[in-house]
Image (tube, grey):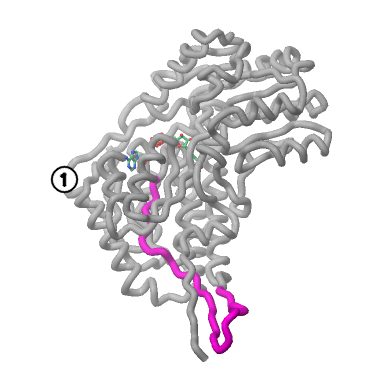
């Protein structure tokens, strides 16, 4: 069985306590690798290495242009190893190889984009109100960044953090999810090859309660950049605030996917299906509440069910497979329990609703694509993040009703509107409380488009030019002339 090492100061290292965690393949429910069960001692070694790299040595000596060149070199190595890294994530995470390969081919763009942006960060000269003074601003890197990532898209979500952080001149210690750490540890090996100075990028694996909390609490960490559940995010944000650390939070969602009667209903149907069943529903942007205008509700649901019923499940490596397993056993149990909660609340299962017993699913953690009707927005199934292949369909009467239902939830990560009326699309996109609104599409993301949450879905923004400022602080320099 493959045994991975911690990556600290450019070296592969065993964990200080000599303990390992089995990493399970969700398709077979069997261990396929071991990752280090890190501890506070490993966190300290990694943060010290990152702090040394930030404050002395080669990294701060590099110009922003040279940092950008290193990021672009890294992009080339990811492009070269895209298939290998994608296979590792399929083994560890159960996501479809077709999707992972697409993600891994797209990830280099983050390093090209922020590599190009590194030397375009500029200060300003200030038109002061005081005679005899001259002042200008500088944008300086914050220091050591703790990047804590979830299990659902380990490398994709990591790239959103580290590409701008490194472009800004910070150094990084990553704590990936204990369920899916392998690809991040393999990725770390590319930093030496690209020529990054040791200590600029470090990875400590292990459990959140040990490694994650030690990292957040470490006094030399200047900023915590977290993606994960809102419960964990709240705890981390409080711990960071106690030491006045910077933090950004990308948290959960309960996104409404809103279909008006005048929409292109075939496109809307595909959008609804990919919005919830892609990645087996395990995406923060999952369109888990499908709001359908009442006049087309029954016909649209019928069409949706007929299409979703044809989904092929099974081996995530097969290009034929359309829905893969749930990534972890606790998540599998949680999703099944939410289906029971929904039934007890009065929802009607019109598709799926059970674990999958198809032969092609073997011993894996598969759940049948599930569609629920008779859902109203006050039910737990409509309010809480399930993070699985479970779609709740809710009817609405008109624009005002759709808006009321869409916004009546504590999350605000994403929303979509399907309509042929541009006025309706613009009014809805203005009034929907979400960090991303899609019109006649779903799931589109880009390194160029800011991404983040309203309400309980988070703090701060990733992607786009402004994301680099999440890792910089501004200094005003005054000169008495
Ligand atoms: P999680 O909150 O359980 O864990 C996320 C990470 O935090 C893991 O690495 C975990 O080990 C670590 N952690 C746990 N407890 C910690 C602690 N006390 N201190 C420090 N670190 C700790 O989330 P998950 O189950 O891995 O991921 C699923 C969640 O992530 C969902 O809620 C999903 O919506 C969210 N998510 C959000 C986005 C986004 O961009 N908004 C993207 C993907 C996933």
> Extreme bottom residue here?
481
Number of numbered discs visible in the structure rendering = 1
Question: Is the residue marked by circle 1 packed among few (<14), some (14-19), or many (20+) residues within 10 Å?
Answer: few
Quadrant containing ligand 1: top left
Task: Work out whether residue 87 can be spotted.
Answer: yes
For the point 60% across and 28% down, the residue is: 408
Using the image as rendered, state which of residue 479 and residue 78 is in the foreground: 479
Task: Based on the picture, tell me whether residue 403 belongs to the magenta stretch.
Answer: no
Task: Based on the picture, tell me whether residue 144 belongs to the magenta stretch.
Answer: yes
Numbered disc 1: secondary structure: loop
The image position of residue 78, as x and y in percent, is 48, 54
User: Which span of residues is magenta-colored?
Assistant: 123-148
> Extreme left residue here?
17
Q: Is residue 147 rendered to the left or right of residue 47?
A: right
For the point 28% across and 62% down, the residue is: 49
The image position of residue 247, as x and y in percent, is 42, 51
- Above or below for 322 versus 468: above
The image position of residue 351, as x and y in percent, is 59, 12
Q: Quadrant of residue 129?
A: bottom right
The image position of residue 372, as x and y in percent, is 59, 14
> Extreme front residue here?
130
| Quadrant in which the N terminus is drawn | top left
- Above or below for 325 versus 166: above
Whether the residue carrying mark 1 lies under 8 Å from ligand 1 is answered with: no
For the point 19% across and 51% down, the residue is: 41
- Above or below for 400 versus 45: above
Using the image as rendered, state which of residue 205 and residue 1 is in the foreground: 205
For the point 36% across and 55% down, the residue is: 244
Task: Work out whether residue 358 can be spotted.
Answer: no
Q: Quadrant of residue 18?
A: top left
Q: Is residue 243 rendered to the left or right of residue 403?
A: left
Question: Which residue is tagged 1?
Answer: 17
């Amino acid at each position: 069985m493959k045994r991975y090492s911690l990556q600290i100061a450019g070296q592969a290292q065993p964990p200080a306590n000599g303990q390992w965690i089995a990493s399970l393949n969700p398709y077979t429910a069997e261990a396929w690798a071991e990752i280090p069960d890190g501890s506070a001692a490993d966190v300290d070694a990694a943060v010290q290495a990152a702090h040394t790299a930030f404050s002395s040595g080669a990294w701060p000596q590099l110009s922003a242009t040279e940092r950008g060149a290193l990021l672009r070199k890294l992009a080339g190595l990811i492009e070269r190893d895209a298939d290998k890294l994608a296979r590792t994530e399929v083994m560890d995470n159960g996501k479809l190889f077709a999707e992972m390969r697409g993600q891994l081919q797209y990830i280099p763009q983050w390093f090209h984009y922020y590599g190009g942006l590194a030397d375009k960060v500029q200060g300003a000269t200030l038109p002061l109100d005081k005679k005899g003074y001259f002042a200008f601003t500088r944008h300086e890197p914050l220091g050591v960044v703790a990047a804590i990532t979830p299990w659902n898209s380990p490398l994709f979500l990591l790239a959103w953090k580290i590409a701008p952080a490194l472009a800004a001149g910070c150094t990084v210690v990553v704590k990936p999810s204990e369920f899916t750490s392998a690809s991040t540890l393999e990725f770390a090996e590319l930093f030496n090859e690209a020529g990054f100075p040791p200590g600029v990028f470090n990875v400590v694996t292990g459990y959140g309660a040990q490694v994650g909390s030690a990292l957040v609490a470490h006094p030399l960490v200047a900023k915590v950049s977290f993606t994960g559940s809102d419960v964990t995010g709240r705890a981390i944000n409080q711990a960071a605030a106690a030491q006045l650390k910077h933090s950004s939070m990308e948290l959960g969602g309960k996104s409404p996917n809103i279909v008006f009667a005048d929409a292109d209903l075939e496109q809307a149907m595909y959008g609804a299906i990919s919005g919830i069943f892609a990645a087996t529903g395990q995406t923060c942007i999952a369109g888990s509440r499908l709001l359908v205008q009442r006049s087309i509700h029954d016909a649209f649901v019928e069409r949706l069910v007929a299409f979703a019923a044809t989904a092929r499940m099974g081996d995530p490596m097969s290009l034929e497979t359309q829905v893969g397993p749930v990534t972890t056993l606790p998540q599998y149990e949680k999703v099944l329990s939410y289906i029971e909660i929904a039934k007890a609340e009065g929802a009607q299962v019109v598709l799926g609703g059970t674990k999958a017993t198809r032969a092609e699913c073997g011993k894996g953690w598969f759940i049948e694509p599930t569609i629920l009707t008779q859902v109203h927005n006050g039910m737990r199934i409509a309010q809480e993040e399930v993070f699985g292949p479970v779609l709740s369909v809710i009817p609405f009467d008109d624009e005002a009703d759709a808006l009321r239902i869409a916004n009546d939830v504590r999350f605000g990560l994403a929303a979509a509107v399907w309509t042929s009326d541009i006025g309706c699309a613009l009014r809805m996109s203005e009034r929907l409380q979400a960090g991303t609104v899609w019109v006649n599409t779903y799931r589109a993301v880009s390194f160029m488009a800011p991404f983040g949450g309203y309400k309980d879905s988070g703090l701060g923004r990733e992607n786009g030019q402004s994301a680099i400022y999440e890792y910089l602080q501004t200094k005003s320099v005054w000169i008495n002339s």
